[in-house]
Image: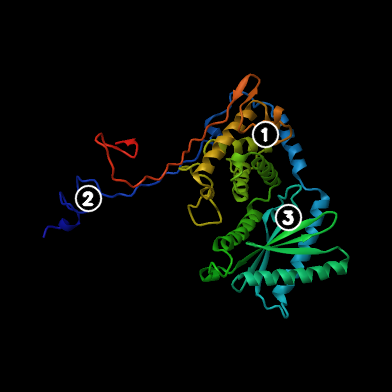
Amino acid sequence: MVRGAGRGGRGMPGRGGMGRPPFNRPRVLMLRPPFDLILAEPAFPRCKPAPDDSALTQALLKRHAELCPTPAEQSAVLSLVTKLQTVLDNLVVAPGDFAACQLEEVRQVGSYKKGTMMAGKNVADIVVIMKTLPTKEAVEGLSNKVNEELNKLMRAEGAGSVSCGCHERGFTVTSSGAASAAVRVLVTTLHQNLRKLEPEVHLDYKVISSHLAAIRHSRWFEENAHHSSIKVLIRLLRDMCARHSGLEPLTPWMIDLLAHHCIMNNPARQALPINVAFRRALSLVAGGLFLPGCAGLPDPCEAAHARAHTALDLAAQDAAAATAQTLLRVVARGGHRYVLGLQAFEGGKDISTEITVWDGVVVSPLAPAYQETPEPMDTDDKDDEGVQDGVAA
């Protein structure tokens, strides 16, 4: 037997011998990043001084001051979180006669923990990790126990009362008073219990997993995104996303990663000024950072090669890029006050969805590039000219 004859030797139909291309070679998906002038700046040196951008900087700082919660709001949330944390910690260490469930750990997560809380949104988040399986009865029992113990503590301090309401993620504790506040208690379980969950009996698997992910997000943020400029940019981006429908699908975690990337990811490894980072964020999203085929932003809390923007569907990815392009053109024409929400456009126009004019320059919103294709109809009927289902063959 000739050596190699059975494994694709010369001229043999094996695994692609000499002179034959290999068959069924898997395609390699090449993810490409959008053009980023900050990272490419060494290749494009300036030929004239940078323009004065102090007007944008002042507008950003002014808007951020409006978005920060007042001292009264912060105090109300802090008081409720501290009391609730005390009650839950006692149930972890000494549950006593409480037998509805067993608690493993209590962790603060979300915008309150990260220091990015917004004005008018006095809501904090706490994740409770159960040792036992998170049945709906267990969540209700925990809610009743927390309500009972917390009201005892509130009455002892003369601080009013609280109420608890259950929902699909756990329950919410709401305080009454001049400055009301709320804490969402998000229920999850140990990682090894995830395979034991039953849809009819326990909380939803995706909800439980998202609460575990929230703990990872808060831990990563605390270790890597403690710079104050990152928190400023996060508030500005969240406010902008809430006011423009095309950016609404962006999740808080995607905004956190985008703000961290725009502030810290640069050749000097130093925090960029807030005006530069804001323009960079709009430019990256407009350039396709969250579009299919783009490298996007790697998720540091998930498995290797996971991208944060894959949580969006194709229509949302297209809308985010188109909206960012429109807003970036408005900022380039000096309309940053309208983009930031400091000033309303005449006639109540939405600058991201309606045609506007800036010093004689017309800015038209882009039409959607993504069109959902209808599912093909199963039919065997063909006419004489080879036309099937109304589409020429």
Give the SS element for disc 1. helix
Three-letter amino acid code of the residue under disc 3: Val
Residue situated furthest left in the rendering: 1
| Vertical side of 76 occupied by 309: above or below | above
Neighbour class for label 1 at 10 Å: few (<14), some, many (≥20)?
A: many
90 is higher (above) or lower (below) than 263: below
Q: How many marks?
A: 3
Q: Which residue is mark 1?
A: 339
Q: Which residue is mark 2?
A: 16
Looking at the image, is mark 2 or mark 1 nearer the viewer? 1
Sequence-first disc among 3 and 1 = 3
Q: Residue furthest bottom?
A: 97
Tell me the crowding category of disc 2: few under 14, some 14 to 19, or many 20 or more residues within 10 angstroms, Cα based. Answer: some
The amino acid at mark 2 is Gly
71 shown above or below 211: above
Of pointers 2 and 3, the one earlier in the residue sequence: 2
Question: In the rendering, at what x and y percent does residue 107 appear?
Answer: 67, 63
111 lies above or below 342 = below
Viewer can see residue 248:
yes
**Among numbered discs 2 and 1, the one appearing first in the sequence:** 2
Residue that lies at the very extreme toward the right in this rendered image: 158
Query: What's the CA distance linking mark 2 and mark 3?
Result: 62 Å
Residue at mark 3: 123
Question: Where, quadrant-wise, is the N terminus in this rendering?
Answer: bottom left
Residue 339 found in image quarter: top right
Locate residue 237, reporting x and y percent: 65, 42
Do labels 2 and 1 touch, CB within 8 Å? no
Q: Position of residue 249 (x, y in %)?
A: 59, 45
Nearer to me, 171 or 231:
171
> In the image, what residue type sits under mark 1?
Val
Nearer-the-camera pick, 23 or 244: 244
| Residues packed near mark 3 inside 10 Å, few (<14), some (14 to 19) or many (20 plus) | many
